[in-house]
Amino acid sequence: MVARGLSALARWRVHSAFCQSVRLLSAVGLAAIVAWLTNLQEPGWALITSVIVTQNSITDTISKGRDQLVGTLIGASVSVIPITLMLFLHWPLWGAFTLAFVPLVVLASFNPEARMGIVTLMIAILFPADDSPYMRPIERVIAIMIGVSASTLVTYVVLHEQARRDAFRNAAVTVRQILAMLQKARAGHVEWSVIQDMNDECAASLRLVHAALEEARREHWVPLEERDPMLARLPNGLRQLQMDALVVARAMLSLPDSGVALPAQSAAALRAGMLRGFQWIIQRCESEAVARTGADNRVAAEVIAALPSATGTSDPIIRFVVGILLTDLRRLIQLLGDDDADREVKSRYWSGWRALFSRRGKTA
């Protein structure tokens, strides 16, 4: 299981690096073409901006692009003041530059996203152009806009469905951590602080699933609940499973050493059935992290049917908490085994056409 997890992680890293390489090359190429068509004096700034702005996710790309564009606009606007002072009032270079530089430094101290304004001011004042000095900040803004636009377009268009793979990859990691937490608690002789640390790791992985889910919502204009209902409901199922596992682990560690909640044979059957369920969820998430494989109701039904029950335990606390864990485990398996998004789209499509033709037939 660990070897398969490491292999899946290595494949994900290679695939993610390949996708980012393609996006970065595409953004730089698009920015170079647009900069060449607009005949910029220094097209390199558009290329540099495309490299800085292009990130692995749409959210990060938009954030970087916004910071670059806002900072550049601030710096270009402020640079007009020292340029005017030097041209018409014959101020010395460093005096006019300092007058505009100090306020931008103070602004960047309160708002780090405005640092690009300082860079733009330095380029416009300390590296003057051959033609009108006012053209340098204008061209700088145009170059930044070209780089930001190219990066944003490429991030949306080129290999943009990375978020779904990230969500299921992190979901598999989360389920592994939940299973490890339960096995650690079952082994006994472990401090509750260790279980809490493992639960914090689960929570961190679950936050990555939520972040990927929000990223997936931005990838399409169609609501995620319609085009991928399994992904939309996945974080809630994982969070419920994590909370159940923490309660079960607490109950296991709270039992007295002399109390036996289950016979040995029943305990082994319970552990084997639950382990199979967890392993199936991990494998299903890993397969979805590679490609959307569609529904597999038959296998999911077999896994659910093989899950044990907690009725054999004599301890009411263990029977209650394990029963809740098994219930939520069944729900998550059923969710992962019933990916009916494509079927729903087709059914809505054909039902719409049937309704249209039926109305036409009645009219005739």
Image (cartoon, grey):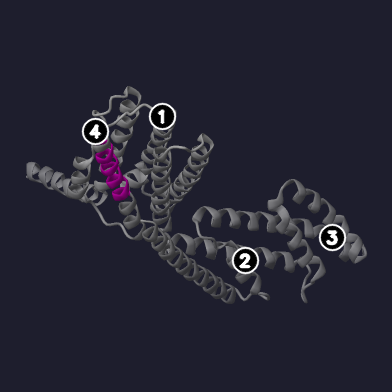
Q: CA distance from mark 3 to mark 1?
A: 79 Å
Per the model, the C-alpha gap separating discs 3 and 4 is 77 Å
Q: Is residue 121 magenta?
A: no
> Between disc 3 and disc 2, whose residue precedes?
2
Q: Which of the marked residues, 1 or 2, is nearer the chain's N terminus? A: 2
Q: Which residue is at a point 43% across and 55% down the rendered structure image?
A: 166
Q: Amino acid at mark 3?
A: Pro
Above-or-below relation of 91 to 342: below
Residue at 92% across / 63% down in the picture? 91
**Cα distance in 3D space between marks 1 and 2:** 63 Å
Of the residues under marks 1 and 4, which one precedes in the sequence? 1
Residue denoted by label 1: 257
In the rendered image, the vertical position of residue 76 relative to residue 243, given as above or below? below
Which residue type carries mark 1? Answer: Asp
- Residue at the spot of label 3: 82
**How much space separates mark 1 and mark 4, taking CA atoms?**
23 Å
- Residue 280 picture location, percent across and down: 28, 50
